[in-house]
Image (cartoon, rainbow, N blue to C red):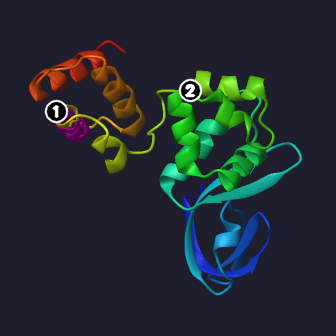
Amino acid sequence: MIAFIQGVITEIGDDYIVINHQGLGWLVYYPHSLEVHVGEELQVFTHMSVSENDMRLYGFSSSKEKTLFLNLISVKGLGPKTAMTMLQKSGYALITEAISKGDVAALKKLPGIGAKSASQIVLDLQGKLVAVEVSSTKMMNYPLEIQEALEALKNFGYKGGDLNVVGNKMLEQPSMKTEEYIRFGLKFFASR
């Protein structure tokens, strides 16, 4: 429907901004409203949520953040307001990392998320998200052969969360050469 809006911010609230785009003021619920300023030009990726009693436009700083939001609201019992609060309090990187690691305890700390919801989020979304890229600091903790293998797998199109998982599995196979770790990684992904 409305993929994105670009314009000047005219008003800021605790959880929303108003963007002037060609003379129309768009009220957009935005998780980073406290990080922007009136008069600033901004592009937000949007999702319109329509229910029986309400119609809201939600905005995101990137298409990745929007995709995470859409994945979160696909989880049974998790609505757009809760998903938006999760993004506001924790942000994309921490949420995707918690989901990819299956860290129910970290998710339970978020407002509106209990043990059941946190478990359901992990159950539904673990392995399905494009997780945070393996950071160079994290990769430095791996032996050189594993670092090289992970870099090769990354070039094959495998993403952050999956690379974290396979990197930890590679640690359980010490003293292999880079090529062997690459084959190990490919076999691991093929078996999933």
Residue 94 figure quarter: top right
Looking at the rendered image, the disc whose residue lies closer to the viewer, 1 or 2, is 1
In the image, residue 150 lies in the stretch drawn in magenta: yes
Where residue 71 appears, as percent x and y from the top left, is 59, 37
Where residue 1 appears, as percent x and y from the top left, is 60, 54
Q: Which residues are magenta?
A: 147-155
In this rendering, the answer to whether 44 lies above or below 38 is: above
Which mark, by number, is residue 145? 1
In this rendering, the answer to whether 154 lies above or below 84 is: above
Which mark, by number, is residue 126? none
Asked whether disc 1 touches disc 2, contact meaning CB atoms under 8 Å apart, the reply is no
Residue name at image x 73 percent, y 77 percent: 25
Give the overall secondary structure of the magenta segment: helix
Q: CA distance from mark 1 to mark 2?
A: 26 Å
Name which of mark 1 and mark 2 comes first in the sequence. 2
In this rendering, the answer to whether 65 lies above or below 26 is: above
Query: What residue did someone put label 2 on?
Result: 102
For mark 2, give the secondary structure.
Answer: loop
Direction from residue 43 to residue 55 in the image, left or right: right
In this rendering, the answer to whether 50 lies above or below 74 is: below
Within 10 Å of the Cα at label 1, are there few (<14), some (14-19), or many (20+) other Cα atoms?
A: some
Residue type (three-letter) at the residue carrying disc 2? Gly
The quadrant of the image that shows the C terminus is top left
For mark 1, give the secondary structure.
Answer: helix
